[in-house]
Image: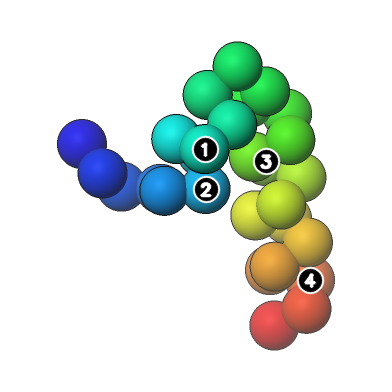
């Protein structure tokens, strides 16, 4: 279940999680 710890931190805010992942992908 512990796939994306970042998402778990912001369970209520899925958009925030997606934004974070997108930002990370853009940085890479």
Mark 3 neighbour density, 10 Å: few (under 14) some (14–19) many (20 or more): few
Residue 28 at what x, y percent from top left? Answer: 69, 83
Q: Mark 1 points at which residue?
A: 9
19 relative to 5 in the view: left or right? right
Q: Earlier in the sequence, mark 2 or mark 3?
A: 2
Q: Name the residue under label 2.
A: 6
Q: Nearer the viewer, mark 4 or mark 2?
A: 2
Q: Which mark is drawn over residue 26?
A: 4
Q: Earlier in the sequence, mark 3 or mark 4?
A: 3
Residue depicted at x 20% and y 36%: 1
Residue 23 placement: quadrant: bottom right
22 in relation to 13, above or below: below
Q: Which of marks 3 and 1 is nearer the N terminus?
A: 1
Question: Could you give the CA–CA distance between mark 2 and mark 1, rounded to whole angstroms?
Answer: 5 Å
Q: Which of marks 1 and 4 is nearer the N terminus?
A: 1
Q: Mark 3 points at which residue?
A: 18
Residue depicted at x 60% and y 16%: 12
7 relative to 21 in the view: left or right? left
Q: Which of marks 4 and 2 is nearer the N terminus?
A: 2
Residue 18 at what x, y percent from top left? Answer: 67, 41
């Amino acid at each position: 279940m512990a796939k994306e710890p970042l998402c778990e931190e912001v369970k209520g805010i899925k958009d925030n999680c997606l934004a974070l992942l997108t930002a990370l992908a853009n940085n890479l």
